[in-house]
Each structure stands twice: as structure tokens, then as C-alpha cells.
Image: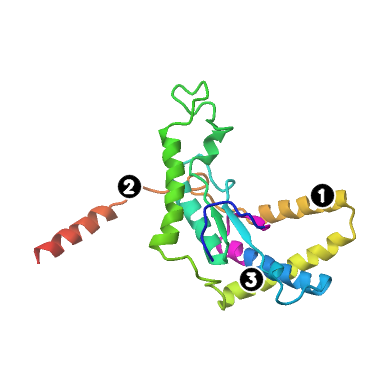
């Protein structure tokens, strides 16, 4: 897929990319299969019709970003972006690591010095946006992840998870067909709530705290220093 940072002109589905890692990849793959299968079986769309090729706009999850140790959000957003690439998303948007502090274009009240009033977005926030753009460029240019279609296809784990999600989604769609719009909306929200609760993950910096600083950087420096003397 092509990793583009511009918003798509073609109709496509918007997906939030979050946790867990492999399930998010399988989710995008399952939706593509279900889309093509439904159009062919229910609407009689021809096999060669371009409409079967569903485009996905992947956006890294804002919900997964937290205020505690916000620098960890850099890694979170980068891994969520990798999910989009590995799932074959055509468009990718990466959230800045300071997203949890942003409220209507301003830093949240209490985040400035003194903790009393909101303050304008600072150079830190400009840097956060630049870092998100650079992460996008790293995936595209340095790691060579553009132009590879479905790189995890054939993996037993990914294929099994994709088939399972596709089967569950098809069953859910069948259940929704017999419901009124309002009842269907309530049912969807109920299922989403149960799924979110079942997939609650331990959050570093919130649920667990890591020990630091690590002595490993000094060890690596020592090894490099010794290698130069040989």
C-alpha cells in the first residue's frame, strides 16, 4: 500500500488503530474480506469491479494516549501506525503524543505554569506534531514499508484471527438486520462496551511503573569503547 499523509478523495472507511496489536491488523483485513464478499453475494457486484477494493484510512488511537509519562505516547503512536501499514491501509494519520492535553486547540487547564489557566499551545506541541510527521516519514522512507501489499498474509496466527473476526462480524450484521435503527445503535454500543472491557490492557505509567534509569546505556558505551582500542 502507499503511505499517504493527505486525506483521501475516494470513499473509504475510517479506522482507529489501537490495541491489541495483531487484532487491529486482523480487523482491517477482515473488513476488506467482508466488504468484498457482501457486495458480490448480496448486490451481485462483478469480481473485477473496482468498488470491491476497499480503501482504509487508518488513524492512530487518541484514546490509547495518556497524560501519565506522555513520552510513552510516542512509542504507542508509532506502533499503532505500524499496524496500519501491516494491515494494508492506504492512508495513515498519526496523532501527536501530547493529544491528551489538547482541548480545542489549547493546552488543558492546569497544564501551564501555576496550573490555573489554559495556555496557548507551546513549542512543545509544535514539536509533537513535527514528530508525528517524522514518524510517518520514517515508516515510508527509512524502513521501506511502502508498496508492500498484505505483508502478513499467510501467517497462521493472523489468518486464523482474521477469519474469526470476519465470522463474528458477519454474524453481528445478520443480527442487526432485523432491528430498528435505534435498537441497532443500542446493541452496537453494548457490544462495543463489552469488547472494550474484555480487552482492557495494562497501561505503563498508569497501572504499572517501570524502574529506572537503566544501566544498560553505560554498558553499551563501555563495549564500544573497548572495541575501538583493538
The disc, 2 or 3, on the residue closer to the chain's N-terminal end is 3
State the residue position of label 2: 213
Q: CA distance from mark 2 to mark 3?
A: 38 Å
Q: Residue at x 58, y 33 (%)?
A: 103
User: As drawn, is 63 to the left or to the right of 124?
Assistant: right
User: As drawn, is 137 to the left or to the right of 186?
Assistant: left
Q: Secondary structure at mark 2?
A: loop
Residue 76, x across and y down, in percent: 49, 52
State which region is magenta: 11-26
Q: Secondary structure at mark 1?
A: helix
State the residue position of label 3: 161
Q: In this view of the protein, which residue sits in the foreground, 111 or 89? A: 89
The disc, 1 or 3, on the residue closer to the chain's N-terminal end is 3
Q: Residues within 10 Å of mark 3 (few under 14, many from 20)?
A: some
Residue 112 versus residue 45 in the image, above or below: above
Q: How many marks do you count on the picture?
A: 3
Front of the two marks 2 and 3: 3
Residue 166, x across and y down, in percent: 71, 69
Residue 186 is tagged as: 1
Q: Quadrant of residue 31?
A: bottom right
Describe the colour scheme in one phrase: rainbow
Residue 144, x across and y down, in percent: 42, 66
Is mark 2 in CB contact (under 8 Å) with mark 3?
no
Q: Secondary structure at mark 3?
A: helix
Q: CA distance from mark 1 to mark 2?
A: 47 Å
Q: Name the quadrant of the C terminus.
A: bottom left
Amino acid at each position: 500500500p502507499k503511505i499517504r499523509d493527505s486525506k483521501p478523495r475516494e470513499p473509504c472507511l475510517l479506522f482507529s488503530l489501537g490495541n491489541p496489536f495483531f487484532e487491529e491488523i486482523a480487523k482491517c483485513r477482515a473488513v476488506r474480506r467482508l466488504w468484498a464478499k457482501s457486495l458480490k453475494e448480496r448486490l451481485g457486484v462483478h469480481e473485477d469491479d473496482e468498488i470491491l477494493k476497499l480503501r482504509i484510512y487508518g488513524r492512530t488511537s487518541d484514546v490509547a494516549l495518556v497524560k501519565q509519562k506522555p513520552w510513552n505516547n510516542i512509542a504507542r503512536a508509532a506502533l499503532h501506525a505500524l499496524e496500519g501499514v501491516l494491515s494494508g491501509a492506504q492512508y495513515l494519520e498519526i496523532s501527536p503524543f501530547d493529544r491528551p492535553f489538547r482541548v480545542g486547540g489549547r493546552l488543558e487547564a492546569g497544564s501551564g505554569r501555576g496550573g490555573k489557566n489554559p495556555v496557548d499551545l507551546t513549542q512543545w506541541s509544535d514539536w509533537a506534531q513535527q514528530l508525528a510527521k517524522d514518524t510517518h516519514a520514517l515508516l515510508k522512507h527509512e524502513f521501506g514499508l511502502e508498496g508492500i501489499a498484505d505483508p502478513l498474509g499467510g501467517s497462521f496466527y493472523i489468518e486464523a484471527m482474521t477469519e474469526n473476526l470476519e465470522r463474528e462480524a458477519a454474524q453481528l450484521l445478520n443480527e442487526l438486520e432485523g432491528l430498528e435503527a435505534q435498537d441497532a445503535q443500542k446493541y452496537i454500543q453494548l457490544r462495543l462496551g463489552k469488547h472494550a472491557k474484555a480487552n482492557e490492557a495494562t497501561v505503563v505509567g498508569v497501572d504499572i511503573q517501570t524502574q529506572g534509569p537503566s544501566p544498560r546505556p553505560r554498558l553499551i558505551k563501555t563495549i564500544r569503547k573497548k572495541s575501538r582500542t583493538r
